[in-house]
Image (cartoon, helix red, strand yellow):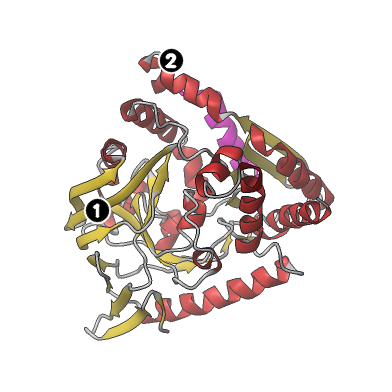
Amino acid sequence: MENFMSNLNKYAELVVKVAINLQKDQTLVINSPITSVEFVRAITKKAYEVGARYVHVEWNDEEITKLKLLKAPEEALKEFPIWKAKGFEEMAEAGAAFLSISASNPDLLREVDPQRVAINNKTAAEALQNFRRYTQTGKVSWAIVSVPTKEWADKVFANLDESERVNALWENIFKVTRVNLDDPVASWKEHINNLRGKLEYLNNKKFKKLYFKNHSTDLVVELPNDHLWIGGGLKNEKGNEFIPNMPTEEVFTMPLKTGVNGYITSTKPLNYGGQVIENFTMTFKEGRIVDFTAEKGYETLKKLIETDEGSHYLGEVALVPHKSPVSDSNIVFFNTLFDENASSHLALGSAYPLCIEDGGRLSKVELEERGANTSLVHVDFMIGSNDMNVDGETLDGKLYPIFRGGNWSI
């Protein structure tokens, strides 16, 4: 117990000082499930210790969400409290930092009609799209981290005795976030520096196309001429660094909206809004999905793709080595925050404006004119494997190996 509390406090300190990099007199907004109260209290304590002005906690209960989706009239699913959306926008405008704790039951909404889930998700996305602009452009500091729940641990470690599952998930979260090391803060600084070396290479090469190929994927991804690779840490508008995802092993950019051709096969399950999609394929022509299949969760995937026009296209292409702390754990987490950092991946929906030169200053129309995809959604899904090869083609037609056998070759 003593070692657990020590790691919990180290985790909270890492989140506040490195992931969010909270500044003196800054407000911290925490979105958290009620099951994560112990961790939220630890973060709140660390936040005030570094000089936070105020810590606001926005609690949610997924069981209440499930009841709403099962029993509320459909018209209620088309309503979102505007006061809440405006409140987030006002706090962002005032320079607050935002932390989300991802700790859901992967099978929560298994019994719910995917159509009702889709309506509810789209309603929230529409209401929060102005707020989302603050995070996607890096105007404010934000981060996503995770802690176990019983239901999540039961899904991941079904092979263990029930009494051991939550502890096993904690141990693995501490490991992949480097919390179990003597100095997690120093370790993260070294890790981010390593990622920056990859970014420098990719941004210098200015590849016009990427070729992804393994036993079940054959995809060509064209990139905009003025694309930028980003990853690890970002800077907000005040110049303060932060790490949006913890753990993170990826470097990513945006594809040219109409420049994706070929097919992919998923290599890990996708937990989307409490419903699991497994063993799915997608075929792209001139950027658009023209065919898809799924062994499990087909209707959920269909509703996701049909969210809007932009959800038929890709908004992100990310490189993640097969050799990484998350991948080395050999665990399927059923949580995108972790699984996407074990595998190269793509994302349906909106591109991050920061992935194109001066993108943070561009309007939606201007981004689209530059080849970026826009959408209400941004959902990552995994395609990487230990036999994935990735090549980059430069403007003069030369090919360079980027990945061989799932790992960096640069």
Image coordinates for residue 400, horizontal then vertical, percent: 31, 84
Image coordinates for residue 326, horizontal then vertical, percent: 53, 63
Highlighted magenta segment, given as a residue range: 80-97
Disc 2 to disc 1, C-alpha distance: 33 Å
Residue position for label 2:
72
Q: Where is 219 relative to 161, above or below?
A: below
Q: Where is 74 relative to 145, above or below?
A: above
- Amino acid identity at mark 1: Thr
- Amino acid identity at mark 2: Ala
Residue 25 seen in the figure = no
In front: 372, or 62? 62
Q: Secondary structure at mark 2?
A: loop
Instruction: Specify which label sits upstream in the sequence, 2 or 1.
Output: 2
Q: Is 87 in the magenta?
A: yes
Which marked residue is nearer to the observer: mark 2 or mark 1?
1
Image coordinates for residue 111, horizontal then vertical, percent: 39, 27
Q: Report the residue that reaches farthest toward the top.
A: 73
In front: 28, or 190? 190
Task: Identify the residue at image location x=68%, y=54%.
Answer: 15
* Label 2 close to label 1 by CB (< 8 Å): no
Q: Is 410 in the magenta?
A: no
Task: Identify the residue at image location x=33%, y=30%.
Answer: 114
Q: Secondary structure at mark 1?
A: strand
Q: Which mark is residue 281?
A: 1
Task: Identify the residue at image location x=27%, y=70%.
Answer: 214
